[in-house]
Image: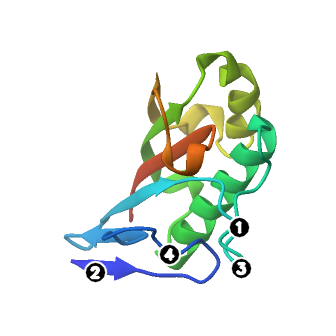
Amino acid sequence: MVTIKTNNAPDPVGPYNQAIVAKGELVFVSGQIALEPSTGEIVGSGDITSQTIRVMQNIEAILQAAEVSWDNVVKTTVFLSDLNNFAAMNQVYAQYFKIEIAPARACVEVSRLPKDVLVEIDCIAIRV
């Protein structure tokens, strides 16, 4: 296994890595929240659109560090603190994927997310 680390995404806030590459081809990206990498501060307090943009930017930085792109993502999981935010989150999320190769996805509402953010997203990509 190889760990992935980039300064363009927030440092982990616990005992985990930004991503792990397993068997040389599977990239497991840890759940990302709306943390600004340079400050460690939450972005867009109460604004699902701003938070989703920051989450996707963080994931993109990790994917780039792992030498893959959005086209390589095969599965995502979206955690929302309120499913009423689904449509706004989905508008941002959709901008990152080509519809014909969009990944499989699960989206769930949870009672609370780290640092009381509105959204957390993780993903799995494959190196091809």
Crowding near pointer 2: few (<14 within 10 Å), some, many (20+)?
A: few
- The residue labelled by disc 4 is 67
Say whether marks 3 and 4 touch (CB < 8 Å): no
In the displayed structure, does residue 34 sit left or right of residue 13? right
The answer to which of marks 3 and 4 sits earlier in the sequence is 3
**Disc 3 and disc 1: Cα gap in Å?**
6 Å
In the rendered image, the vertical position of residue 23 relative to residue 53, given as above or below: below
- Nearer to us in this view, 105 or 25: 105
Say which residue appears at 65% left-offset and 40% top-offset: 98
In the rendered image, the vertical position of residue 24 relative to residue 121, given as above or below: below
- Nearer to us in this view, 104 or 11: 11
**Disc 2 and disc 4: Cα gap in Å?**
12 Å
Res. 2 mark: 2
Work out which quarter of the rendered image holds the N terminus and state it.
bottom left
Amino acid of disc 4: Glu
**Disc 3 and disc 4: Cα gap in Å?**
22 Å
Q: Quadrant of residue 14?
A: bottom left
**Disc 3 and disc 2: Cα gap in Å?**
24 Å
- In the image, residue 102 lies at what x, y percent? 55, 36
The answer to which of marks 4 and 1 sits earlier in the sequence is 1
- The residue labelled by disc 3 is 38
Crowding near pointer 1: few (<14 within 10 Å), some, many (20+)?
A: many
In the rendered image, the vertical position of residue 21 relative to residue 77, given as above or below: below
**Disc 4 and disc 1: Cα gap in Å?**
22 Å
Say whether marks 2 and 1 touch (CB < 8 Å): no
Per the image, label 3 sits on a secondary structure element best described as loop
Per the image, label 1 sits on a secondary structure element best described as loop
Crowding near pointer 4: few (<14 within 10 Å), some, many (20+)?
A: few
The answer to which of marks 2 and 1 sits earlier in the sequence is 2
Say which residue appears at 72% left-offset and 20% top-offset: 87
